[in-house]
Image (tube, rainbow, N blue to C red):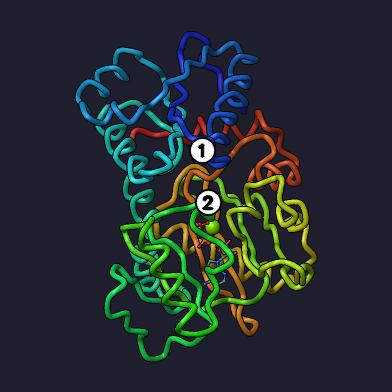
């Protein structure tokens, strides 16, 4: 079904800041791709840029949105490079204006932007996650009994592999302390120290509100890339000039057994439900000793034309326009 609302205007919300970071620029490129879809349908897309200053006066920001009177807000705002939490603040505001908006709710975005909170929700739902602790201060770092090396260090409140570098994998306490101290200087919300999951990495693209459609599963088998680190660093994900970016390519049609496919789909659906995901989202999992663990839930992931999410949708036979339509149909006032 094609979404037609010829007399309405759609607002495409995206952040505007002076950052050359690739993950930040990608959101703006995505805005252009989505605007093209609406133009083709004869629906007027209006870019709605969100700047850091806007949050100094939320009432004014709310008024500005209301004055545009759109039939829907396509929300591509992911916060700012130095303040990802603003993604949550913005959606909270959207929830108060009573205009349908695309993607996930304030609850989901806020829980998923706090990796420890997301993990505790998953654990309460009896879903498998790697053992971990949160470290907020470089003083008296106590490694909980039962947490075994190698350990992985990642910022608690970031996404898109921000803060994931070579030293994210520590084989002993010395390496761990150095990496933690370095991270804490940049990520004041704290760092998660997690048992390393060395196996294959899966990413499941899902679509839907109450019942979820699985668009597909991609796989990264790090054992194929012995020259590179066995995890997705920021460079491998975003920096096209690096060898790892060019070499480490997810397989969008992996050959996996029926049982494994069923387990991956079952776990990712349960995880997304536990976090009340809506609209479009991805769930990342990794294996250890043949067992699957949920690693990360990504509400509102990149949906540009060449994103991993869209590649899986294309494989399933969808066009870009169809998925964007569907995302608008799934929009809600929350
Ligand atoms: N416990 C872990 N074991 C192995 N690899 C991990 C672990 N946690 C994260 N990674 C690696 O780091 C990447 C980014 O971590 P993730 O938890 O997905 O955070 P985000 O994508 O939000 O930055 C993953 O794609 C994966 O390659
Ligand atoms: Mg991830």
Ligand 2 in which quarter: bottom right
* Left or right: 118 in relation to 139: right
Quarter of the view holding residue 105: top left
Q: CA distance from mark 2 to mark 1?
A: 10 Å
Q: Position of residue 241 (x, y in %)?
A: 71, 46
What is the x, y in percent for residue 126? 41, 75
With 68 as the anchor, is 150 left or right in this view? Answer: right
| Image location of residue 315, percent across then percent down | 76, 46
Q: Secondary structure at mark 1?
A: helix
Q: Is ligand 1 less than 8 Å from the beta carbon at label 2? A: yes
Residue 307's place in the image compared with 189, above or below, is above
Q: What residue do we see at 55% from left, 42% from top? A: 23
Q: In the rendered structure, which disc, 2 or 1, sits on the residue that comes first in sequence?
A: 1
> Dot 2: what SS?
loop
Looking at the rendered structure, which numbered label has been put on residue 160?
2
Residue count near mark 1 (Cα–Cα under 10 Å), binned few <14, some 14–19, many ≥20: many
Q: Say whether residue 176 is left or right of residue 134.
A: right
Q: Residue at x 62, y 58 (%)?
A: 203
Against 168, residue 70 (above or below) is above
Query: Residue 89, which numbered label?
Result: none
Give the residue pinned by disc 1: 24
Kindly give the residue lying farthest to the bottom in the view shown.
145
> Percent x, y for residue 178?
44, 73
């Amino acid at each position: 079904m094609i979404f037609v609302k010829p007399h309405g205007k759609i607002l495409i919300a995206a952040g505007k800041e002076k950052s050359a970071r690739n993950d930040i620029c990608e959101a703006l490129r995505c805005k252009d791709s989505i605007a093209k879809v609406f133009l083709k349908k004869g629906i007027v897309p209006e870019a709605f840029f969100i700047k850091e200053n806007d949050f100094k006066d939320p009432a004014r920001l709310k008024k500005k949105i209301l004055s545009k009177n759109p039939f829907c807000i396509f929300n591509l705002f992911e916060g700012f490079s130095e303040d990802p939490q603003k993604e949550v603040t913005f959606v909270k505001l959207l929830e108060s204006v009573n205009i349908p908006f695309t993607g996930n709710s304030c609850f989901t975005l806020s829980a998923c932007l706090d990796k420890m909170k997301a993990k505790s929700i998953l654990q309460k739902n009896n879903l498998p996650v790697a053992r971990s602790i949160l470290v907020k201060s470089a003083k008296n770092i106590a490694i909980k009994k039962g947490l075994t090396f190698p350990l992985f260090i990642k910022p608690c409140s970031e996404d898109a592999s921000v803060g994931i570098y070579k030293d994210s994998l520590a084989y002993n306490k010395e390496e761990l302390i150095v990496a933690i101290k370095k991270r804490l200087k940049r990520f004041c919300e704290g760092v998660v120290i997690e048992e390393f999951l060395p196996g294959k990495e899966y990413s499941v693209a899902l679509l839907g509100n109450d019942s979820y459609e699985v668009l597909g599963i991609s796989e990264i088998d790090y054992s194929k890339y012995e020259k590179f680190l066995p995890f997705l660093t920021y460079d491998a994900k975003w920096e096209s000039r690096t060898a790892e970016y060019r070499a480490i390519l997810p397989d969008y049609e992996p050959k996996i057994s029926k049982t494994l496919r069923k387990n991956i789909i079952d776990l990712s659906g349960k995880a997304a439900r536990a976090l009340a995901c809506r609209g479009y989202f991805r769930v990342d999992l990794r294996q250890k000793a043949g067992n699957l663990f949920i690693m990360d839930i990504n509400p509102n992931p990149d949906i540009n034309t060449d994103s991993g999410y869209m590649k899986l949708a294309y494989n399933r036979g969808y066009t870009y326009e169809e998925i964007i339509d569907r995302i608008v149909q799934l929009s809600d006032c929350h």
